[in-house]
Amino acid sequence: MRHTIIKNCKIIDGLGNPAYKGTVSILGDKIVDHKNLDSGNADVVIDATGLTLMPGLIDVHCHSTFDEPSSNDELFFHRREGLAAIIASQNVKKLLQAGVTGFVDPDGIFDVTIDLRDAIDSNVIQGPRMLCGGNALLTSVGGTAGRLIPDRGLRGYAKIVSTPEEIKTEVRRQIKNGVDWIKVHVTGLLPRQKGKGEVQAWSLEELKLVCDTAHELGVPVMGHCRNAQSIKDSVEAGMDMLLHATFMDEETLEKVVEKNVPLVPSFTFQANLADFGHRVGANENLKEIFRKEIEESASMLKKAKKAGVPILCGSESGFSLTPYGEWHYRELEIFVSELGFSNLDAIAAATGMCGIHAGFHGETGIIADGKFADLILVEGDPSQDVTILKDKSNIKTVFVGGKSADLTPNPERNQITGWRVSQYSSKTLTQEATSD
């Protein structure tokens, strides 16, 4: 087995402990106690003086198959399964270039997530360590796409289920096909009630049926929840992880703390739209809605962290506002600026905590004997400033399972016919609009 030694580096262990100077040894795909090895027999010795060695980032909310749509229309009606798989295999390389060595894809279009994960696992393509869901489970009320969701069948990432038998059948189908997670879109938007925010689209009994069916077969369940009741019912039903988990109240927080359910706020999308939406023509009303979600949810998430609830990093990469390889660091920055995390705590939320609580069984995200050698060498010290990770030129080397990743940028892509939504115009051409 290949033996690599990385010496003279500052080490961040991924568990929130202070950084320290030291040496790390890699034997095959695992970190090993270098004191028990003969360093003279190493195949590679890296002098990392002036660099920081840390676990690679783990992004627990990354949609690898969406390919950065600018609208639900584009995502649902302008994607083809084979091409989506080919493009996704290239886009995951962008995650490596940003220092991401592991990710969870909650749901994808068609069954591409499962095939992508298996291609990475079998070394057909290079990518981060990956866990995946299949199609998100929705009721006919829909998700955040409203009336674009049909009353039955499959559209984009969404599988619509309406009866107990349909729920059980779909959960079992996805598990048979090999998913690591089942995802439920617990809340959704109703066109006439958008001012109220997302409403709960599942009953408690339906949520329990999903969880019981999945747990009987040894698979965890995550839920997309954006109001207090949906969070409370999801916890009561037995969910293993919650995405967003925003707009909690005190009663809901008590339930979350009692069950110690990991939360993935996924604020990067909201923050990008709020801060930079004007640069890409985003709706001004949406900017304020998403800024409000962060502001109104921060206090409860702070209380959850203080009570010991795992808070994990997820960027919701995969949309036009969160393109692959660009914003994976930003959730750490938001945790520091909005949730009061220290730099080390934010790094732990994006590494060790994800490795422990997101389905990786504690085998990655941590620098310790026996863990997978999923590591990054960084110019500078992220334990003092996590935004160092913003500049990809600071990420000097990326290891996944002890193997160095190819950090060569992807070739520029040409336009693909029918892949992107094209607009006739951004305004209506009335006669008045043509007058000087």
Image (cartoon, rainbow, N blue to C red):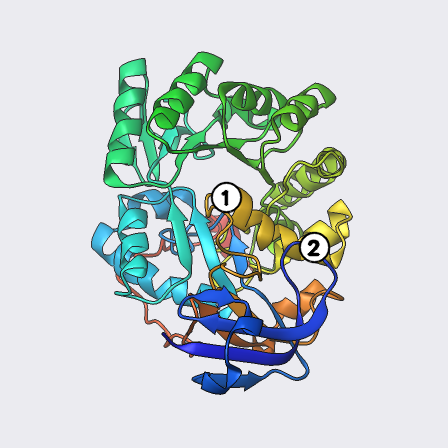
Q: What residue do we see at 35% from left, 56% from top?
A: 420
Instruction: Using the image as rendered, state which of residue 329 and residue 45 is in the foreground.
Output: 45
Label 1, label 2: how many angstroms apart (C-alpha)? 17 Å
In the image: residue 199, left or right of residue 248: left
Residue 1 image position (x, y, % from top left): 36, 74
Q: Dot 2: within a 10 Å radius of its alpha carbon, few (fewer than 14), some, or many (20 or more) residues?
A: some
* Cβ atoms at labels 1 and 2 below 8 Å apart: no
Image mark count:
2
Q: Confirm whether residue 120 shows in the render.
A: yes
In the figure, residue 297 lies in which quadrant? top right
In the image: residue 349, left or right of residue 100: right
Q: What residue do we see at 63% from left, 40% from top?
A: 310
Tag shown at residue 16 = 2
Tag shown at residue 358 = 1
Residue 141 image position (x, y, % from top left): 41, 22
* Element carrying mark 2: loop
Q: Mark 1 or mark 2: which is in front?
A: 2
In the image: residue 157, left or right of residue 306: left
Instruction: Using the image as rendered, state which of residue 377 and residue 8 is in the foreground.
Output: 8
In the image: residue 13, left or right of residue 404: right
Residue 186 image position (x, y, % from top left): 48, 26
In the figure, residue 127 lies in which quadrant? bottom left
Q: Amino acid at mark 2?
A: Gly
Q: Amino acid at mark 1?
A: Ala
